[in-house]
Image: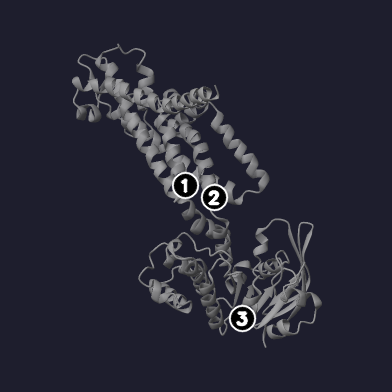
Amino acid sequence: MKEKIITKNLNLWYGAFHALKNVNSNFSANRITAIIGPSGCGKSTLLRVFNRMNDLIEGVRMEGEVLTDGINILEARADLVVLRKKIGMVFQRPNPFPLSIYENIVFGAKIHADNIKKDRLDEIVETSLKSVLLWDELKDKLKKPALRLSLEQKQRLCIARLIAVTPDVLLMDEPCSTLDPQATARVEELMRELKSKYTIIIVTHNMQQAARVSDDTGFMLLGELIEFGETDKIFTAPKDKRTEDYITGRYG
Amino acid sequence: MQKIKEFIIEKFIFICGIASIFFVVLIFLFLLKEGLAVFKFVKPLEFLLGKNWYPISEPAQLGILPLVLGSLLVTLGAAVISIPIGVGCAIYIAEIAPLKIKETLKAGIELLAAIPSVVLGFIGMVTLVPLVKNIFHLPTGLTALSGSIMLAFMAMPTIVSIAEDALYSVPKNYKEGAFALGATHWQTIWRVMLPAASSGILAAVMLGIGRVIGETMAVMMITGNAAIMPNSILSPVRTLTATIAAEMGEAVVGSEHYFALFAIGIVLFVISFIINVTADLFLHKDQK
């Protein structure tokens, strides 16, 4: 298995609060890795380290190494534009821009290159929407405002918008938490389909979802990565007592 | 006893509530009654498009076109100066400035709004007017341009504070979404924040312009007060507001001059009304 993201002794503080403690992990390419754990355990924070979204918060300090394709992304000279193009993120609340569906999808293409031909943009829109199975639904409504879509469509659109910039890694921060069960099932199905092309890391508070969709699972508690391994093993034979307590529903 | 008290208070509040509307209607009716009387002396088109404003010559010529153009010229100039600076300032405060500078700037903007217009006019008269005169080698610095610059200062606080509010209320997750796609800070502002806040910013601009068009004191002091057809932004002009303020004292009650000044009041009222309604429409659209 090829490793895509490796963290070595990763520590993170928000001001004086120690949010991530010595996290060591390997995220493999073309697999879905779920990060589970109770609220406030640092799972979203960890996800947001990988595309440096934590930089938007004041008073954040990080130590250690996060390597992707041999580059330490925590270094001050890391190019955040290149990094975020390569490692995209889907948020908990679908956040399409208040623009048309079409403009939402070509947004990434337009910011990363000037003067792209209209044909090329049309092509990007079509392939991106097809890959999230929205093309047939939306091909006649591309000029409509994206904010009018249903929640599930919005979230798919956000994934399509991400795919349009051809990332390697998709970070998903509780992508289904605002969706109903049917929509959740369809988005999970989509994730399985995307797996062959992308490395997917999903943060979820829903253990069933982690069990259903992921190949590997990491369990976090109070800023520490307690256990990390293949999903089957974590859920059937956890090594750590705390992991067992969590997945059997004793807390969380 | 309690019931009577309740009844009286309720009625009192009711009267307070409708009082403002009542007075607006009264003022409007009075304005209409006095203003429309001018059309006994002059045809509406002649009034609006006449090029000569000689209200006390015999026979009086009551064309307000030079005054309308004066107002429009000064307003346009002020808009051209204050909109880019105001919106730029709002972007800086809302998005770029560190917290400390942000607080200082906001206080400064509020202070700017608190300067009485006559003081601004006075300062403009002794500093800006000679400057304009020397730079452009004019016989007088009392020009539409001087008025525009001074009024731009008055429009700016309105534009900055409302536009800044609009930018501030853009949902945070739009910004995160753009950053997560690798957008730079400026790309995020230009392609996401500004479109998302556009209706609020337009409302800010409209209200700023509304402030400018209604302003009287400063323009009266520094635009030269010449009711002639302006041929450029460097010629002296007189605005609608300044005309009313300057001439109302000397107009004989019941004369055609007197009625004409009220008719100018109606024109101003209509312009401000249109601007406010437009601003309101934009703000309302934002809430939907």
Element carrying mark 3: helix
Q: Where A58 sits versus B7, above or below?
A: below
Position of residue B195 measured from the top left corner of the image (x, y, whole percent): 46, 55
Residue closest to the eye, B214 or B223: B214
Q: Earlier in the sequence, mark 2 or mark 1?
A: 2
- Report which quarter residue A42 is drawn in: bottom right
Residue A5 seen by the camera: no
Q: Amino acid at mark 2?
A: Ser
Q: What is the chain identity of the residue bearing mark 2?
A: B
Pointer 2 with pointer 3, Cβ within 8 A: no
The residue that mark 1 highlights is: B200
Q: Amino acid at mark 1?
A: Gly
The residue that mark 3 highlights is: A212
Q: Amino acid at mark 3?
A: Arg
Q: What is the chain identity of the residue bearing mark 1?
A: B
Q: Residues within 10 Å of mark 1 (few under 14, many from 20)?
A: many
The residue that mark 2 highlights is: B169
Residue closest to the eye, A183 or A90: A183
Element carrying mark 1: helix
Q: Where A158 sits versus B239, above or below?
A: below
Image quadrant where one finds the C terminus of chain A: bottom right
Q: What is the chain identity of the residue bearing mark 3?
A: A
Position of residue B277 measured from the top left corner of the image (x, y, whole percent): 38, 39
Pointer 2 with pointer 1, Cβ within 8 A: yes
Q: How many marks?
A: 3
Q: Nearer the viewer, mark 3 or mark 1?
A: 3
